Amino acid sequence: MKLVIKKAKESSVGVVAVRNSNHYGIAGYYALMAAEEGMTGTSMMNSRPLVAPTGEIERVLGTNPIALAAPTKDRPFLLDMATSVVPIGKEVYQRKGKSIPEGWAIDSEGNIIRDVGKVFNDSALLPLGGFGELFSGHKGYGLSVMVDILAGIVSGGTWSRHVKNTSEKRARSTTSL
């Protein structure tokens, strides 16, 4: 983000792409760096597939976080969110033996589930908006694809189901999205 800010100061716009870095819990931190310099900042990253697109049951997209920060008179505006109903980092439910709220995930047959243990195995999270188009799941799906295109394809990195855990390396695929 320091390089983005430097480029923006020199030419009004700064854009930098990073590839093969698919774990990202602090998108807002980087966006805020730009806001603290009086600029609007955006930060996003695609991540390993955990989310089933609207109308599907297979994990295809990541939670694909996106953040936007803008300066204001007092303190900066910050939006920092996953493009899924919830980021996968909700292991607290598992530790406490609690069920996840209805509408966060589906099993491998497309049934809504509440068992957090299944989410970490063969099930999938849902896009922001939830299951199907009735609750606008297609909008979260669209946002996730947008992040995948900008953070994966544009950077020359991996995207969609080609993204692996940060500890796993995979060569860039030439298959289209």
Image (cartoon, rainbow, N blue to C red):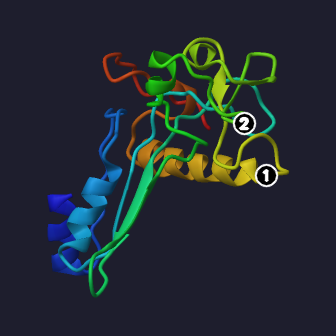
Q: Is residue 164 left or right of residue 58?
A: left
Q: Amino acid at mark 1?
A: Phe
Q: Residues within 10 Å of mark 2 (few under 14, many from 20)?
A: some
At 31% from the left and 34% from the top, the residue drawn is 21
Residue 39 rendering spot, x and y as whole percentages: 27, 77
Mark 2 element type: loop
Looking at the image, which is closer to me, 37 or 155?
A: 37
Q: If the image is split into quadrants, where does the N terminus sit? A: bottom left
Looking at the image, is mark 1 or mark 2 earlier in the sequence?
2
Of badges 1 and 2, nearer the viewer stands 2
At 50% from the left and 49% from the top, the residue drawn is 147
- Residue 105 visible, this angle: yes
Q: Which residue is mark 2?
A: 103
Q: Is 149 rendered above or below residue 71?
A: above
Q: Is 151 rendered above or below residue 71?
A: above
Mark 1 element type: loop
Q: Amino acid at mark 2?
A: Gly
Instruction: Specify the quadrant of the image occupied by residue 43.
Output: bottom left
- Residue 16 visible, this angle: no
At 33% from the left and 56% from the top, the residue drawn is 28
Q: Which residue is mark 1?
A: 135
